[in-house]
């Protein structure tokens, strides 16, 4: 929440400034406001938020809180689903401004709202009368009363109407409201905010020029959802503040859902929260996933069973196999010795995370400046590549090194300065030597500037000789000499220094960016159950439907409905019986045969009745139950009416789930 508030702060500050200016114009009756009133223009903020609609609610809630704290208490948030007509819009608007609940169903025939004991008609004159009354009441209050904003804002605060999803509003509703509001703008300081998910051009597509000309529009752009996500990953995952980490496959699942489904940062955070819950629920040793200061206390409070769980971890078993025989015996039999070793290993894991983040950011400084982005432009892409395997063994990394060896001096110096800042932000002394080395490189680059003029073109260029030689023999000889000189050309001091810089960065990468899976006890802090997470987040409605209809006891928890061997229980819900019978049919299903089979299953456990009248009545009931079950199956999309035969239906699903 703190991160999202900081990301939206600039946008909200700009909106507050815009609304304050609009209000001050109205309050002071300046020349600009007078001119605007002549044209009946309404101050309007077009707020472009992007297609991640699920994140908009948080932004609008924050905007509403900021406006009510700093500008005006009169803020209304309107949604298209609540405003199918201008009457509904006015009811919602006045209801929110007057802090009263409105039931639209009860007011379908009445354009009024209930305020205290009075009924107020939902119209713009009524809204203006109410506004005048509440502002006069505010002016008459004692000046000693504390207020959140300045007195001039409270004297005549603007009425802010926020259209949360402008694209979903019908054109007629927007046109009518804007035209009506513009006629009363000199009496009511109204300000509109349009929440836009697509493009600002939607305003001109929805509104004709005669209506859009009544708006004085200013455009505001929120931070893109990709930048928002990168900041979230940087502050939540690429930090040593939080011991819990996501494995490569789990992180890739969350990023893929974000990129290919909804662009929703909120859903990404919900997935992250789900990973936390799943990890601490399923991992018996998650008690050790804690901050560095708490490790010792928690390690020495482990029970014998928990020590056995540590010994079963694959990474710990690999660690034991590399030790001497005597130490192996102690680790596998002595719990006290195991706890001491576990404490050291967890502390090393924390140090690894701190160093990993610093070097990852340094590597990102280099790779993000390359022209082709072999390892990706975003740090999340680089992070996934480093988690997946040894990044220095990949072709993309080799390509990045080759491109880095062709960078110019200005870019290299800038990158080195950024790396120095990143490494100096580390609290420990691990990177003191690295910082000194990088500063030494910067000093050498500065010295090269003074020596550059002395090393330019010492020898005579062979191209001048080509102008003197005109016969074929001397021309061929000169060309061969030129080719040989180019082949055996020595590297300049700058090129050698550039190679040295890239090689040093490469050595840091190989030392600190080892994949987490190679670290001992990584299972304690890393959540790697990608399949479990995918099962929670990637909905499979057909599989769930098949399970519910084929095995109703699974969801109803009624063992009487359980049928082994593919049988059909007559106690099952009608739709389950119809569904199982339809699985035995081909492309076209005869309704008469289907009904007879359904009747046979339902009547299987009932005794035969000799009364013909009651038997006919039972058949009618079964017929009605069958029709309802088939209609429900059609609604779920398993069958559809067939045009080939009127007494048949076509089956739409095939294969197993």
Image (cartoon, rainbow, N blue to C red):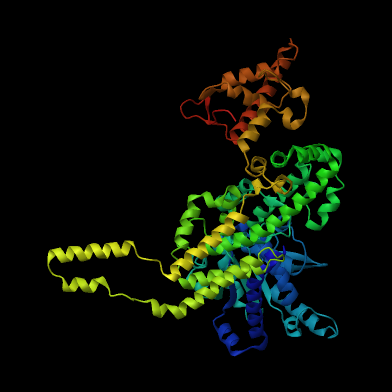
Horizontal arrangement in the rendering, residue 443 relative to residue 358 (left or right): left
Horizontal arrangement in the rendering, residue 514 relative to residue 98 (left or right): left
Q: Residue furthest bottom?
A: 31
Q: Is residue 494 above or below residue 251?
A: below
- At a point 34% along the width and 62% down the height, the residue shown is 488
- At a point 48% along the width and 54% down the height, the residue shown is 398
Residue 637 or 331: which is nearer the viewer? Answer: 331
Is residue 446 in view from this perspective? yes
Q: Is residue 291 above or below residue 552?
A: below
The location of residue 532, given as percent across then percent down, is: 67, 40
Residue 603 or 416: which is nearer the viewer? Answer: 416
- At a point 66% along the width and 59% down the height, the residue shown is 355
Residue 160 or 511: which is nearer the viewer? Answer: 511
Q: Is residue 295 above or below residue 529?
A: below
Task: Quadrant for the C terminus, please.
Answer: top right
The location of residue 270, given as percent across then percent down, is: 69, 52
Residue 209 or 559: which is nearer the viewer? Answer: 559
The location of residue 646, given as percent across then percent down, is: 50, 26
| Quadrant hosting residue 495 | bottom left
Total numbered badges shown on the rendered structure? 0
Is residue 74 in view from this perspective? no
| Quadrant hosting residue 117 | bottom right
Task: Quadrant for the N terminus, please.
Answer: bottom right
The location of residue 559, given as percent across then percent down, is: 77, 24
């Amino acid at each position: 929440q703190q991160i999202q508030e900081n990301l939206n702060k600039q946008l909200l500050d700009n909106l507050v400034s815009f609304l304050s200016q609009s209000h001050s114009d109205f309050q002071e009756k300046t020349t600009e406001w007078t001119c605007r009133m002549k044209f009946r223009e309404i101050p309007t903020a077009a707020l472009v938020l992007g297609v991640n609609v699920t994140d908009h609610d948080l932004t609008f809630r924050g905007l509403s809180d900021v406006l009510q704290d700093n500008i005006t208490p009169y803020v209304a948030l309107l949604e298209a689903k609540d405003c199918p007509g201008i009457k509904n819009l006015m009811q919602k608007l006045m209801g929110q401004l007057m802090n009263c609940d409105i039931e639209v169903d009860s007011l379908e025939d009445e354009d009024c709202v209930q305020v205290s004991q009075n009924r107020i008609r939902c119209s713009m004159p009524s809204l203006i009368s109410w506004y005048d009354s509440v502002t006069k009441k505010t002016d008459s209050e004692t000046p000693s009363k504390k207020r959140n904003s300045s007195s001039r804002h409270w004297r005549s605060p603007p009425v802010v109407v926020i259209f949360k999803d402008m694209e979903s509003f019908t054109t007629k509703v927007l046109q009518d409201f804007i035209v009506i509001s513009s006629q009363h703008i000199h009496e009511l300081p109204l300000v509109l905010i349009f929440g836009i998910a697509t493009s600002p051009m939607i305003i001109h597509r929805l509104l004709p020029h005669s209506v859009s000309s009544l708006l004085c529009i200013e455009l505001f752009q929120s931070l893109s959802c990709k930048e928002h996500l990168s900041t979230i990953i940087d502050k939540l995952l690429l930090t040593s503040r939080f011991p819990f980490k996501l494995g490569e496959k789990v992180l890739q699942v969350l990023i893929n859902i974000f990129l290919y489904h909804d662009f929703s940062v909120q859903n990404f955070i919900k997935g992250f929260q789900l990973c936390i819950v799943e990890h601490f629920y399923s991992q018996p040793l998650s008690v050790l996933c804690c901050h560095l200061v708490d490790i010792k206390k928690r390690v020495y409070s482990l029970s014998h069973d928990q020590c056995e769980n540590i010994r079963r971890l694959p990474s710990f078993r690999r660690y034991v196999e590399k030790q001497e025989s005597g130490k192996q015996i102690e680790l596998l039999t002595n719990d006290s010795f195991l706890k001491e070793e576990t404490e050291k290993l967890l502390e090393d894991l924390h140090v690894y995370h701190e160093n990993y983040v610093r070097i990852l950011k340094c590597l990102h400084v280099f790779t993000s400046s390359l022209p082709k982005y072999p390892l990706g432009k975003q740090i999340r892409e680089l992070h996934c590549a480093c988690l997946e395997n040894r990044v220095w063994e990949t072709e993309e990394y080799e390509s990045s090194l080759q491109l880095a060896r062709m960078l110019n001096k200005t870019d290299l110096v800038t990158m080195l300065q950024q790396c120095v800042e990143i490494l100096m932000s580390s609290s420990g002394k691990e990177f003191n030597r690295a910082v000194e080395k990088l500063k030494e490189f910067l000093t050498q680059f500065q010295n090269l500037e003074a020596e550059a003029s002395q090393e330019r073109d010492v020898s005579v260029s062979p191209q001048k000789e080509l102008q003197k030689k005109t016969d074929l023999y001397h021309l061929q000889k000169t060309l061969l000499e030129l080719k040989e000189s180019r082949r055996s050309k020595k590297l300049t001091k700058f090129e050698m220094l550039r190679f040295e810089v890239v090689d040093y960065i490469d050595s840091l990468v190989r030392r600190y960016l080892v994949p987490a899976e190679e670290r001992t006890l990584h299972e304690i802090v890393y959540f790697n159950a990608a399949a479990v997470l995918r099962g929670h987040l990637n909905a499979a409605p057909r599989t769930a439907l098949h399970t519910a209809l084929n095995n109703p006891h699974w969801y109803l928890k009624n063992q009487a409905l359980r049928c082994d061997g593919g049988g059909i229980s007559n106690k099952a819900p009608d739709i389950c019986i119809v569904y199982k019978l339809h699985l035995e049919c081909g492309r076209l299903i005869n309704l008469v045969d289907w009904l007879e089979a359904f009747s046979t299953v339902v009547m299987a456990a009932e005794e035969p009745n000799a009364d013909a009248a009651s038997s006919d009545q039972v058949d009618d009931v079964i017929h009605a139950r069958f029709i309802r079950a088939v209609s429900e199956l059609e609604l779920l999309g398993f069958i559809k009416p067939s045009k080939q035969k009127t007494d048949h239906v076509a089956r739409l699903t095939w294969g197993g789930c």
